[in-house]
Amino acid sequence: MTLPPVRRVITGHAADGRAVISADGALPTVLSLAHIPGTVFHEIWSTAGSPAAIDNAADPTVGPLKLSPPPAGSRIRMVDIPPDSEALLAHGAANMRQAFASLGAAQASTVTADSPHPLMHRTETVDYGVVLSGEITLLLDDSEVVLRSGDVVIQRGTNHAWANRSGQSCRMLFVLLAGEYQPAIRHSLAGR
């Protein structure tokens, strides 16, 4: 099932300070991941730092798609996640490494022979994930939870994968914030 396109409205300021609509329409960057068929990234916006610059600058989503936000920045995107297929489960690990490499994050893949899912990965980010439609299972190293439309997950740099066992596409909204592992967490991850 193909999900509908995303409409994005961007506001800005006229030269005299009035609030105006700067853009209203389709997203310029929508990427179907070649290595994970059916997975589609819809890039909505990105900031380069905090506090975020409020200006009328060019669209930060145009150009190569990057998985994580810039240092001290943020990224918002929607992701369409198709149902897990036999091919994904059989060959997903190799494909995921290639998919992450194409997004500038080859080191994000953490899959091993005993991983609970071939798409296990970790980023040094805090991610707010909202299920907009469908159902998805969040897998961690030793547990899992089913999430449905309206559910929210706060992903704090943990090793995880998204398994779609529902038979229908799932659309999620993610807000990613650049993060930094604190010493105790960084030390515990060093041995993994």
Image (cartoon, helix red, strand yellow):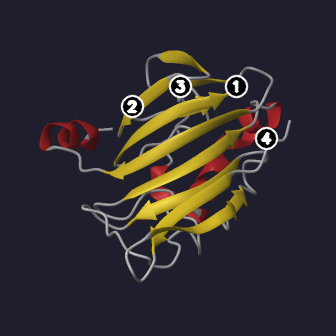
Q: Which circle's residue, 2 or 4, is located before the other in the chain? A: 4
Instruction: Assign the N terminus to one quadrant of the image.
Output: top right
Tell me if 82 is positioned left or right of 131 in this view.
right
Residue 63 sits in which quadrant? bottom right
The residue at 34%/49% (across/down) is 124
Residue located beneath label 2 in the image: 154
Tell me if 188 is positioned left or right of 75 in this view.
left
Residue located beneath label 3 in the image: 138
Using the numbered discs, state the Cα–Cα distance from disc 1 to disc 4 in whole angstroms.
Answer: 11 Å
* Residue 106 against residue 181 in the figure, above or below: below
Residue located beneath label 4 in the image: 3
Tell me if 96 is positioned left or right of 143 in this view.
right
The residue at 44%/28% (across/down) is 153
Give the label, 2 or 4, closer to the camera: 4
Q: Which circle's residue, 3 or 2, is located before the other in the chain? A: 3
Disc 2 residue type (three-letter): Ile
Give the label, 4 or 3, closer to the camera: 4
Give the label, 3 or 2, closer to the camera: 2
